[in-house]
């Protein structure tokens, strides 16, 4: 009978043949050079959590990525449980490649999880959801299975959300990095948004 290390080595060799490790895709650019230099881009797959008061520029941080995806013919979903977003007001966004879901607060976490896990969308944006509680862990698994990015925009921080990137919009184009893909945290940036 083989030793334990030999069995493990045989198992690893077998797994390498049948299921080789894939390199994770590179982060998706934010479209804001100064932000990309600090955080490394939006996680793909993964969750970006952007919080701050209404009017502080939260949507402005993800707008360049939405513009780039839709102009390239890739569909982006925005889950808007409150029904406040007016898509024609989004500059340079190809509305033919923008999916707007207004499902109400109760279904917003579920809808975002389904979209993120579908594998059909590179990015889903969730605007001002209620506390995600159980949906928070499901959402991370969905981004991994769908190889997608989810940007969650809230007024207050949600510590239960397993976000690889956390940004706090302070208003006036100032953003505080709480966590980034490059390990940067605690820095404040003034962006020309």
Image (tube, rainbow, N blue to C red):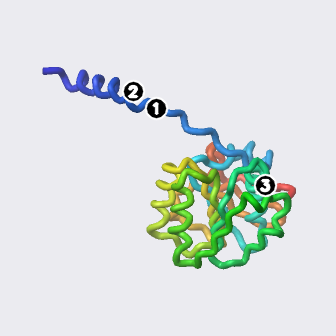
Q: Which mark is residue 67?
A: 3
Q: What residue would you read off at disc 1?
A: 21
Distance between mark 3 and mark 2 Cα atoms: 39 Å
Could you tell me which residue is drawn at 68 percent across and 45 percent down?
A: 28
Could you tell me which residue is drawn at 84 percent across and 58 percent down?
A: 92
Q: Earlier in the sequence, mark 2 or mark 1?
A: 2
As drawn, is 19 to the left or to the right of 24?
left
Q: Residues within 10 Å of mark 3 (few under 14, many from 20)?
A: many
Secondary structure under tag 2 reads helix
**Residue 47: x %, y % from top left:** 58, 55
As drawn, is 26 to the left or to the right of 92?
left
For the C terminus, the quadrant is bottom right
> Is there a contact, CB below 8 Å, between mark 3 and mark 2?
no
Q: What residue would you read off at disc 2?
A: 16
**Residue 13: x %, y % from top left:** 34, 23
Could you tell me which residue is drawn at 80 percent across and 45 percent down?
A: 33
Q: Residues within 10 Å of mark 2 (few under 14, many from 20)?
A: few
Could you tell me which residue is drawn at 52 percent across and 78 percent down?
A: 106
């Amino acid at each position: 009978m083989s030793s334990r290390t030999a069995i493990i080595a045989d198992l690893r060799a077998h797994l390498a043949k049948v299921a080789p490790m894939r390199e994770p895709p590179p982060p998706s650019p934010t479209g804001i050079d100064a932000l990309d230099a600090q955080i490394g881009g939006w996680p793909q797959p993964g969750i970006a959590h952007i919080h701050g008061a209404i009017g502080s520029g939260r949507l402005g941080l993800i707008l360049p990525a939405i513009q780039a995806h839709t102009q390239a013919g890739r569909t982006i979903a925005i889950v808007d449980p409150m029904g406040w977003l007016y898509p024609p007001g989004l500059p340079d966004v190809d509305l033919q490649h923008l999916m707007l879901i207004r499902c109400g607060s109760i279904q917003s976490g579920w809808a975002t999880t389904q979209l993120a896990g579908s594998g059909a969308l590179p990015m889903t944006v969730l605007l001002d959801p209620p506390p995600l509680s159980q949906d928070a862990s499901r959402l991370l698994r969905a981004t991994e299975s769908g190889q997608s990015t989810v940007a969650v925009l809230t007024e207050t921080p949600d510590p239960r959300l397993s976000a690889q990137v956390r940004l706090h919009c302070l208003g006036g184009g100032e953003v505080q990095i709480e966590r980034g893909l490059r390990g940067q945290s605690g820095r404040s940036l003034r962006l020309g948004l």
